[in-house]
Image (spheres, rainbow, N blue to C red):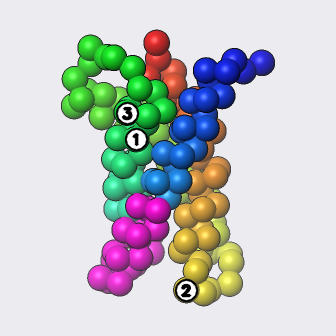
Amino acid sequence: MLNRRTLRQFWRFGIAGGIGFVVDVLVLYIAVALGSGVYLGRVMSFFCATFATWQVNRNFAFATATTMSAWAEWWRYVLAVLGGGLVNYLLFSLAVATLRPSPLLPMISVAIGSIGGMVVNFISTKVLVFRQ
């Protein structure tokens, strides 16, 4: 059973994810408009969203005093979210390849991927980066 603290962290992690989703979609649409293509654009947008969610998570969802430098924490965060990022990118790619083309397809595909990677990323960041 989850305790109140973990549930509160999960909800805050979800808020961070919502902010990351907005960053992800905006950067993806900008990258595609500049000619990157949807798959390369998603790699770029994923890293921008990862930076945004790290900032929110370290200051809001898992706000704790740490002795780790921000640089070390950033790289630990990136490594921790790679598993969820892989799930995210695979679901995104599957959605892009199988759903009907539309102007909203990139956004819908990002949403599908983000939901798929969320639980994996919550567990990995809680255990590997922001453990207490």
- Please identify the quarter of the rendering in which residue 58 is found: top left
- The residue under label 3 is 59
Q: In this rendering, does residue 29 appear at all?
A: yes
Question: Quick check: marks 3 and 2 in contact, CB under 8 Å?
Answer: no
Foreground pick, 84 / 9 = 9
Q: Is mark 2 on a helix, strand or loop?
A: loop
Q: In this view, does 110 lie above or below 8?
A: below
- The residue under label 1 is 56
Q: What whole-number distance in Å separates the C-alpha atoms at marks 2 and 1?
A: 29 Å
Foreground pick, 107 / 97 = 107
Q: Is residue 31 above or below residue 110?
A: below
**Magenta stretch contains residue 62:** no
Q: Position of residue 51 (x, y in %)?
A: 34, 47
- The residue under label 2 is 103
Would residue 7 be found to the left or right of residue 126 on screen? right
Q: Position of residue 35 (x, y in %)?
A: 32, 83
Q: What whole-number distance in Å separates the C-alpha atoms at marks 1 and 3?
A: 5 Å
Please provide the residue range marked out in magenta: 22-42
**Magenta stretch contains residue 37:** yes
Three-letter amino acid code of the residue under disc 3: Asn
Residue at horizontal 41 percent and vertical 76 percent from the top:
29
Residue situated furthest right in the rendering: 1
Q: Position of residue 66 (x, y in %)?
A: 31, 17
Question: Quick check: marks 1 and 3 in contact, CB under 8 Å?
Answer: yes
